Image (spheres, rainbow, N blue to C red):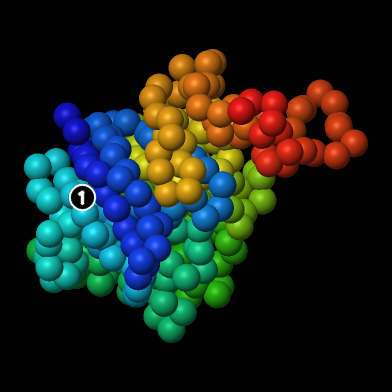
Amino acid sequence: MAILTIKELTIQHQDNTIVNNVSLTIHKGEWLALVGESGSGKSVTAAAIGGLLPAGLKARSGSVLLQNQDVSRLAEKELQQIRGKEISYIFQDYQGAFTPFITIGKQFDEMLKTHTSMSRKERTEYSLLSLKNVQLPEERVYKSYAFQLSGGQLQRAAIAMAMILKPKLLIADEPTTALDGMTAMNVLELIAHLKEQTNCAVLLITHDLRHVRKYADTMAIMLRGEIVEAGEKGSIFGKPQHPYTKQLFAAIPPLRETPSRLLTIAEKEAVFI
């Protein structure tokens, strides 16, 4: 079952095309990694799915289907009912995921109050359980403000909020960029665990091919706003077809030896084109 279907999506800023004719499909329970260097259009594509394009950017053509519903045609009020419930986001700016002036618990409560008919007691109990499920000290975190938590704790709380309503699609946009290696690994393991529990689809926006190799089922390579290669993870890692994909893989530093200088993708271009 296709959870997300993007058809020929084009996004522009004035006369400049940022995303060009992008098509993607993610099925129930599938983990798809959207890979590419900074500025390739990954995050803009992800933002368009939930109607979160920044001012100045506009989808000029194409469609975004959540199952059979074209969310790209919905009004803002209708989108607000879908965000958090059907589509959830985890952003790399974990510090910006929560309002600094109210407690984490209050923000969980507002989410549940907006999308469910739970009583206040039920909302509190469910929020505490969600925080416990992401291996946080639930009572303390529930009563805390964002500034009182570490980066890893905030990212876990953001994951708990994103998954609390069991969305059909979780969009993780560079969720580990600002975290140290061990914390980043724990965060991705947690996302993988919650995905298995809920069987949701995951769209991971990343430039880290190590994470793609370990967690993704499928992957798509993005270059200058276009998808240049897509398919099963094993097939692409085993036999990449597009020159840019080959360049990305060649730019991965070796583990067994330290080169005197890491080559850039541009420097390797002549080898593959």
Nearest the viewer among 124 and 255 is: 255
**For residue 131, side relative to residue 254 (left or right):** left
Residue in the image at 37% along x and 33% along y: 31
Q: Secondary structure at mark 1?
A: strand
Task: Please give left or right for residue 184 compared with residue 190 in the image.
Answer: right
Q: Is residue 194 visible?
A: no
Where the N terminus falls, by quadrant?
top left
| Residue denoted by label 1 | 62
Q: Going 56% across and 29% down the picture, which residue do you hit?
A: 243
Q: Position of residue 96 (x, y in %)?
A: 47, 70
Residue 55 at x, y percent in the picture: 34, 74
For the C terminus, the image quarter is top right
- Looking at the image, can residue 267 be seen? yes
User: In screen coordinates, is 165 left or right of 140?
Assistant: left
Check disc 1: other Cα within 10 Å, few if <14, some if 14-19, many if 20+: some
Using the image as rendered, state which of residue 259 and residue 128 is in the foreground. Answer: 259
- Where residue 237 sits: x, y (%)? 53, 21
Task: Check the image and name the residue furthest to the right.
Answer: 260
Q: Nearer the viewer, residue 20 or 194?
A: 20
- Tag count: 1
| Residue type at numbered disc 1 | Gly
Give the x, y percent position of residue 182: 65, 43
Residue at the outermost bottom position: 101
User: Between residues 142 and 93, which one lies in front from this camera angle?
Assistant: 93
Residue at 59 percent across and 63 percent down: it is 150
- Report the residue at 46% width, 79% height from top: 100
